[in-house]
Amino acid sequence: MTQKIAPADGKLGVLLPGLGAVSTTLIAGVFAARKGVAQPHGSLTQNGTIRLGKRTDNRSPKIKDFVPLTPLEDIVFGGWDIFPENTYEAALKAGVLEPELLAKVRTEMEAIKPWPAVFDRKYVKRLEGTHVKKGANWMELAEQLMDDIRAFQKQHNLSRMVMVWCGSTEIFLSPGPAHQTLAAFEKAMVENDPSIAPSMIYAYAAIKLGIPYANGAPNLSADIPALHELAMEKRVPVAGKDFKTGQTLMKTILAPGFKARLLGVNGWFSTNILGNRDGEVLDDPDSFKTKEESKLSVLDSILQPHLYPELYGELYHKVRINYYPPRGDNKESWDNIDIFGWLNYPMQIKINFLCRDSILAAPIVLDLALFMDMAGRAQMRGIQEWLSFYFKSPMHAPSVYPEHDLFIQLMKLKNTLRYLKGEELITHLGIEYYD
Ligand SMILES: NC(=O)c1ccc[n+]([C@@H]2O[C@H](COP(=O)([O-])OP(=O)(O)OC[C@H]3O[C@@H](n4cnc5c(N)ncnc54)[C@H](O)[C@@H]3O)[C@@H](O)[C@H]2O)c1
């Protein structure tokens, strides 16, 4: 079966709530790649290939030549922040990219100025911003966001839009009564219910306007039944949560290997030092709790202690994030992993990863924007589980557990693309080569 994917004609607006380190690294990177002054490494949509048919067929086109994706030239960025700086100033402040590189895309970046944000300090305690909308209740604020979006579309004559939340991590919230149905949620918006957080207002505004929404932070945002309902009704794709970068990326690469070789794990201690604004926000215990839940869930789900109690039943997993300003965006993480093998003999693995958070996150935002837009054109709606590859806490149907294994996630993503184009799915059986 071939599912029709409408062509990627015209311009695509990429809406970014939160124009901080990740967003500005993405925007600068796209402008630099367009000018040919830097390479968009780490992005499947730009550089990934996909094998089609049998290994003997030698068909491995680039993904962007296989499915219709918006070219970088047709992307227009817009966004909101609680600080009024344009994206050039914000990028300089974030300190991820060198001033020499930013100078080459300065004019384009200066032109992108954030619209005032929907923000309440109750949800991100470490930040205080001045560039914030005023309104009587959440519903009024959602209307103001929708006005921004419509004006942006008109100004740039956009054919389509997508939204990717790149704002700060909000405090931990559990799904409550106001989140269960769309009717309850809309009523709670009018009543300014405190169980509704700003990121939910952005998600609501996007989905209401038929715009695909992905969430790069661990806060609930669109991952509540009320917004799933709205997404199904409006036929809008949604995805989340929490970009999979850094230490968790390494975990989802290593843990499937341990399980494949049936090596036991009885301890995994992970610590980080991080000095950017994200680190400062995560220094608040309520925001950290949201992140911690997201980071902790990964190992349990990959190692499946209920299936392998003797190997993973006693696993002690600890994650720490320490705010340490001198490091800026260049995070350093240490992992100590206590494993055991044949006859219970113990072994240890130490990982010291000197990573750059936003360098790992920017291509994820680009891929999500392009794939979510394509999903919309392919009439896919609701949770896009095939994009789990990009997330620490993938959104999933209530009936299934989330898939965290990076390699299964990649297979799922590529098989979804094959499925959409009516190509044979690849099972890796391969027995036919030996007949
Ligand atoms: N960098 C990574 O590797 C990575 C990985 C996973 C998740 N994330 C998440 O992505 C998000 C962005 O990360 P970052 O490093 O760019 O952080 P950042 O602090 O540099 O940027 C976040 C921006 O969002 C703004 N903001 C906060 N609340 C807002 C609101 N309600 N509306 C509009 N703007 C708002 C802040 O002012 C800030 O400029 C964070 O939630 C982070 O936890 C990042």
Image (cartoon, rainbow, N blue to C red):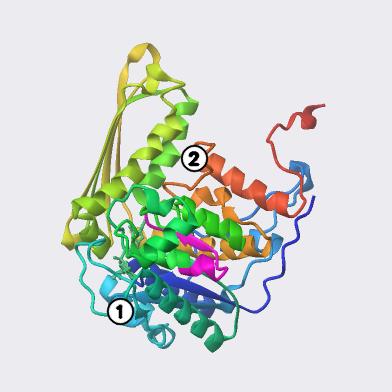
Q: CA distance from mark 2 to mark 1?
A: 38 Å
Q: Is residue 29 visible?
A: no
Residue 386 percent location from the top left of the image: 58, 49
Q: Secondary structure at mark 2?
A: loop
Q: Which residues are magenta?
A: 205-217
Which amino acid does the dot numbered 1 rest on?
Lys
Of the pair 72 and 33, the residue shown nearer to us: 72
Q: What residue is disc 1 on?
A: 134
Q: Residue at x 39, y 20 (%)?
A: 311
| Above/below status of 111 relative to 29 | below
Q: Quadrant of ligand 1?
A: bottom left
Residue 96 percent location from the top left of the image: 31, 68
Q: Is residue 166 left or right of residue 430?
A: left
Q: Residue at x 44, y 27 (%)?
A: 304
Residue 384 percent location from the top left of the image: 57, 52
Q: Secondary structure at mark 1?
A: loop
Which amino acid does the dot numbered 2 rest on?
Pro
Residue 101, quarter of picture: bottom left
Query: Residue 402 — which label?
Result: 2
Contact, mark 2 vs mark 1 (Cβ under 8 Å)? no
Callout 2: few (<14), some (14-19), or many (20+) C-alpha neighbours within 10 Å? some
| Above/below status of 409 relative to 374 | above
Q: Is residue 203 visible?
A: yes
Q: Is residue 312 left or right of residue 270?
A: right
Residue sticking out furthest to the right: 435
Looking at the rendered structure, the number of numbered marks drawn on it comes to: 2
Q: Residue at x 41, y 62 (%)?
A: 187
Q: Is mark 2 within 8 Å of ligand 1?
A: no
Residue 345 percent location from the top left of the image: 32, 16
Q: Residue at x 59, y 65 (%)?
A: 373
For marks 2 and 1 on the same chain, the one whose residue lies earlier in the sequence: 1
